[in-house]
Amino acid sequence: MDYTANIHSPKATPLELWGGIECTVNRIGDTFVDQFDVSGHPVRRSDLDRIASLGIRTLRYPVTWERLAPDGCLQNADWSWIDDYMAHLRQLQIQPIVGLVHHGSGPRHTSLLDPDFPGKLAEFAGAVARRYPWVTKFTPVNEPLTTARFSGLYGHWYPHGTDEQTFAHCLMTEIKATILAMRAIREVTPSAQLVQTEDMGKTHSTPALAYQAEFENERRWITYDLLCGRVGDWSHRMRGHFSSLGVPEQDLDFFVENPCPPDIIGINHYVTSERFLDERIHNYPEHTHGSNGKHQYADVEAVRSMKEGPSGVASLLRETWDRYKLPIAVTEAHLGCTREEQLRWLVDVWKQATKVREDGADIRAVTAWSLFGAFDWDSLLTKPRGNYESGVFDLRGIPEPRETALAPLCRELAAGKLPSHPVLDSPGWWRRPERCLIYASGSHSVDDTSRSREPICLVREGALFAAQRDARPLLITGGQGSLAEALVRLCDERGLTCRVTNRVELDIASIKSINSALERYNPWAVINAAGFSSIKAAETETFRCFRENTKGPALLADACQRRDIPLVLFSSAHVFDGRKSPEPYTESDATNPGSVYGRSKATMEKLVMDRMPEKTLIVRGGAFFSPWDSTNFLTRALRQLAQGLPVSVSEDTLTLAYLPDLGHAVLDLLVDGAAGVWHLGHPEEARRIEIVQQAADLAGLDSKLLWPARWENDSGNLIRPAWAVLESERTKPLLPPLRSALRHFVASSSDQWQRSANELTLHSQEAPHARVAA
């Protein structure tokens, strides 16, 4: 049989951008979790219009068996919503690649161990084809090998097998089901194409584990080899392997006698797809340890352990092309990371696919996967906690999903344009030195035994890669302050080239100083972390407060507006008077500050938004606390408690913001091009004294030393609103729960207050008395 009949010249048509929506219907024990239900997609048909606006004309889209026929009875299937959505896709001229089972095991009446599973799926596939005869591309079973491993070998998913025999049974069931499903589909639509997806990872190892790497690198092809009828005799290593696991010879012969080669091979590629095996398990965390009966070894990400790095998607595409000479598409390209890294990953995969295509391989498309993000993949879907990572659209937007920076990037790729976002001038973390947490010695790839390796060692190099030195920087003002310091740390972590200025280098209240700095650094954006921050001192230093908090930002806005540079400014809940209790303040509430500091911020907001509304992001954040700042209220309180000193803390109710979490959210919004006033903080409100008490309990300190106090000015008036609770009408919370932030804070800042406890003797002559911590 000629499997190359549908190959076309890679130069005949441009590389396409496809899209995909995370659509797993997963079963853990007796519980089914449907990503569509969690995401709300079935009640938001406008999602399809959003996808069309990107220029995407081919979409991996599920018509999942478990969702439509949960009891397994087609007569009871509810097709109403999917009929509507499929009709809308057709109207939008978007071609769906219909998926039937996505990491699932079918409805409750069957499973991957059910010998009737293939026939049952084929019955469902035929019903789908008859209902939508205009659909010509199908993926009956997504990633059979990956699903079989996770369901039959590792025990993560139903039926939770943990042995080779269960794994083999699951895999054979899935491949047979794919063949029978395509047969049923083609009885209705003879031209229907099979787009078969798989994670085409690769395994590297030390020399001692070369035999295990060689086995896994042969096994990774099994989905396509079975579909192509290649596992025909004992010359194929997997024939003997599966036979030894109890797979009957007639079952293996079925695939030889009924070949169903993919019309398009779909490669799902992630940064963790390539693995490294090392028998020196003491160098790696316990959760990475495993055994094959002969060796114990760690199984870790190659990108984190190999100095020279993994092979990369270009190499994997070439290997796939050389083996099958069938059309290929990258059917998932996604990175759960910060926004600029998501941009870099998609562009990196696109560039590599383009290069392999230019070298002569028939690469059809790259798929922007998880257009609406995904839930709980941090636990491989085993713990449904609602942990969300956004995609091209962020589902946390209010009232509708919000476009991220990936949306304009997709439009550029779909239109054949070179991506233009300035963060792309720097390499992704997988190409920077700090990616490598462990250098592996004597590592060995079965395809290359000649490359030398460095001795194993822990490394953590600076994030600024040489290539970044020419990138336009992000300019951060206020270099001597805790906010600027935190932002610089986060930029370094994220590979964002930045320049930070102090008051001498850049006086934000001097237009001459501003212009000089902007000309010198030519930044792509400016974050103003400078300002007057002492709420109490502002009552007597009014001129200085307004100079730094109002005049300076207004001048910055003028200068940035002339150069078309985005600007980020920080405001405060102090622009409100605190009288809205018990309702939180939202972005559209009228300001009415009760302090000099609050008036300086409220005036700044009006002046700046009048000047530059479309490119200014004003963040009203919750009260900051940070592991890198020894002066914030929480660190001061813990330090005093650690010294055994009583601490008085005010009882105002407020929103908090752990600076690392807030900083990441601000940088994501900046990269997205967000503008306007945004409220950012942890979702829970709390009294300040309760926050200190929770932190003290987590730190193992005596919270009985806390007592309440009010902070007033000399006139007896509160200079801080007693109610400073913020909520956003633009987005659902972008910061994690406060309890999680407090745990991170206590763990990260423990050296500060523990050191204070050790210095308690220095205060032995000082009479204990209450100190105001906040």
Image (cartoon, helix red, strand yellow):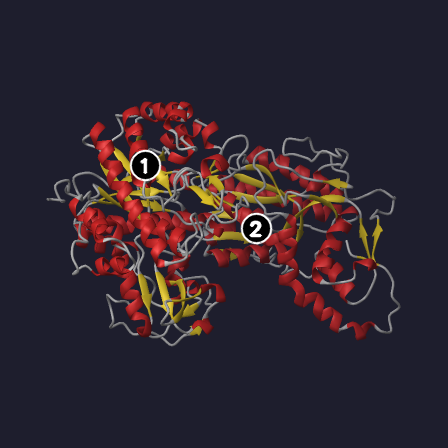
Residue visible at 47% across and 55% down? Answer: 494
> For residue 121, which numbered disc appears in the image?
1
Residue 415 in view in this figure: no
Q: Is residue 84 left or right of residue 182?
A: right
Q: Is residue 621 left or right of residue 92?
A: right
Instruction: Count neighbours of disc 1 (C-alpha within 10 A) and say few if under 14, some if 14 to 19, many if 20 or more.
Output: many
Q: Position of residue 357 (x, y in %)?
A: 21, 48
- Along the polypeptide, which appears first: circle 2 or circle 1? 1
Q: Tell whether label 1 touches label 2 (CB within 8 Å).
A: no
Give the amino acid at mark 1.
Leu
Q: Position of residue 688 (x, y in %)?
A: 75, 49
Q: Is residue 535 left or right of residue 323?
A: right
Name the residue carrying label 2: 663
Residue 206 higher or lower than 637, as above or below: below
Residue 51 higher or lower than 528, as above or below: above
Residue 29 in view in this figure: yes
